Amino acid sequence: MAERARVAVLISGTGSNMAALIYASRAADCPYEIVLVTGDNPDAPGLTLAAAEGVPVARLPRPTKDGRAEFFATLDRTLREAGADTVALAGFMRILPAEFVERWSGRMLNIHPSLLPKYRGLDTHARALEAGDPHGGCSVHLVTPEVDAGEVLGQVAVAILPGDTPEILAARVKIAEHQLYPRVLADYVSRAFDAGWIEAQVDALASRLPEVTRKTSHGSPGWAVGPEKTAKLFAIIADHHHGEESVGLLVKASGPDEMTGLIEAQPDLYYWPKYYGASGWLALKLNRRDVDWDQIAEWLERSWRACAPPRLTKLMRAAEEF
Ligand code: GRF
């Protein structure tokens, strides 16, 4: 199994979702571990439970009225010091500054007690009851600067029964929350190693370039540039090719000297792909947690330029001069 994701959980209160995440992480095949529990309330009961379960806890002082920026700077530092690569909000009752959200963009999840996009914000159960909805429910979503508005990663609907009060419904929804959050978090942190997901990310970047079509290379997914008949491959995904341990992206480098230099300098990222290396293809390892997708986009563009017909690269240069 790939190294486990290092998750920090942020809470303000009870921490029952936090507990669900901790206990799920005890399974031998769970792809994440909880490396820290912290939050904005040093007396949160959840912190005591986490500590009793042997999970590292940071009791940060409550943010003061004017100390919001300072609090989030300390929080950010604490998360980094714990080596967290993913943040799970679980009843963390603070609006996050945009800068903090930006820093953890794509790596911060939240659980919300409604079927989003319905009922963002508070009092979700009362609102569902008032509207006469047949179901309440919960959602796990990515955190973006707008509250409760990020991509929904998973949901569970929970039936509303006659006589339900917001409290009764909340308790039933919590049961669903405790099932949903560990599962969605596990899937989310695993996708960095999923060849299908990796291919979709590369496809999104490669398809932004002009005149790109999909083309296979000896059965591997690839991207080519130019008119269909003469289209030239500029990127290929080698998924555990010939026993290699990597899912690699093959791109055109300038030649063996550059390839050797890069592989020596950053052996975790670059490697010489079997069979393809001799014809100038450099491999970048993509089944990693910390892929820099901007860097991948740059390599794709560079490789595209090296393979595109002059008519297209000329157009590109002309466009850049504007
Ligand atoms: C949960 O209902 C969660 O959906 C919401 O806050 C509550 C936290 O409860 N964001 P707990 O502290 O996990 O018990």
Image (cartoon, rainbow, N blue to C red):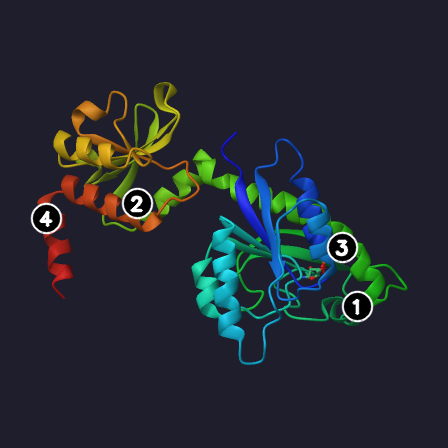
Q: Which residue is mark 4?
A: 311
> Is residue 214 something one can see in this rendering?
yes
Give the spatial CA distance, label 1 vs label 4: 62 Å
Q: Nearer the viewer, mark 3 or mark 4?
A: 3
Where's residue 10, x and y in %?
Answer: 61, 58
Q: Amino acid at mark 2?
A: Ile
- Front residue of 42/145: it is 42
Q: Nearer the viewer, residue 199 or 97?
A: 97
Residue carrying label 3: 174
Sooner in the amino-acid sequence: mark 2 or mark 3: 3
Rendered-image quarter of ligand 1: bottom right
Q: Which mark is residue 296?
A: 2
Q: Amino acid at mark 1?
A: Leu
Q: Which mark is residue 129?
A: 1
Q: Total marks drawn? A: 4
Crowd around label 1: few <14 · some 14–19 · many ≥20 (10 Å): many
Mark 1 or 2: the one toward you? 2
Q: Do callouts 1 and 4 mark residues in contact (Cβ within 8 Å)? A: no
